[in-house]
Image (spheres, grey):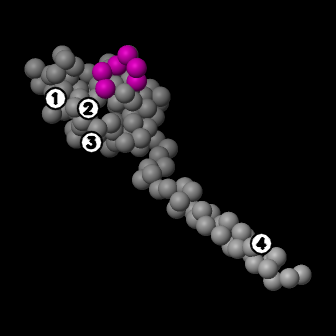
Amino acid sequence: MKLSKLLPAALILLTGCFYDVESVLYPDTGCAPVTTVSYTKDIVPILSQYCLSCHSGTFASGGIPLDTYTSVKRYADNGQLLGSVQWASGYSPMPKNGNKLSSCKVGLIQKWIEAGAPNN
């Protein structure tokens, strides 16, 4: 077989695997696998960082306080908490005038709600 016929085939084989790099195919999302979500350990820090500057105290924005477990549980149970952080249609996207929470943080909130929103 002539070299002129082998060279194009060799080039295709050698360059065809360029994108078979794990970090390109499966980028690190920064989400650590979680089996159990804790209100105290996982949810409170998210609320503290993104929600409580507006949703706490006597004059909580929109009349929605999120500074106690009882109030957070109420909005978790009625779907408003998850709908807002997912920016779902029909809900006010939160945090207001901010960036959407990362998929990891939204996933933690969703997993906690799906587990019954326990006070753990």
Residue 60 falls in which quadrant of the image? top left
- Which element type, helix, strand or loop, lies under badge 2? loop
Residue 50 falls in which quadrant of the image? top left
| Residue at 89% over, 81% down | 1
Which callout, 3 or 1, points at the residue further toward the start of the chain? 3
Residue 95 falls in which quadrant of the image? top left
Residue ID for mark 3: 45
Cα–Cα span, label 2 and label 1? 9 Å
Magenta residues (range): 88-93
**Amino acid type of the residue tagged 3 in the rendering:** Pro
Say left or right for 61 vs 87: left
| Residue at 53% over, 59% down | 24
CA neighbours of label 3 inside 10 A, class few (<14), some (14 to 19), many (20+): few
Quarter in which the C terminus is drawn: top left
Which callout, 2 or 1, points at the residue further toward the start of the chain? 1
- Which element type, helix, strand or loop, lies under badge 4? helix
Q: Give the label on residue 9, or none.
A: 4
In reply to whether residue 92 is colored magenta, the answer given is yes
Residue 76 in percent (x, y) is at 36, 23
Which callout, 2 or 4, points at the residue further toward the start of the chain? 4
**Amino acid type of the residue tagged 4 in the rendering:** Ala
Judging depth in this view, the residue of 92 and 71 nearest the camera is: 92
CA neighbours of label 4 inside 10 A, class few (<14), some (14 to 19), many (20+): few
Say left or right for 50 vs 114: left
Circles 2 and 1 in contact, beta carbons < 8 Å: yes
Which callout, 3 or 4, points at the residue further toward the start of the chain? 4
**Amino acid type of the residue tagged 2 in the rendering:** Pro
Which callout, 3 or 2, points at the residue further toward the start of the chain? 3
Residue ID for mark 2: 95
Judging depth in this view, the residue of 7 and 41 nearest the camera is: 7
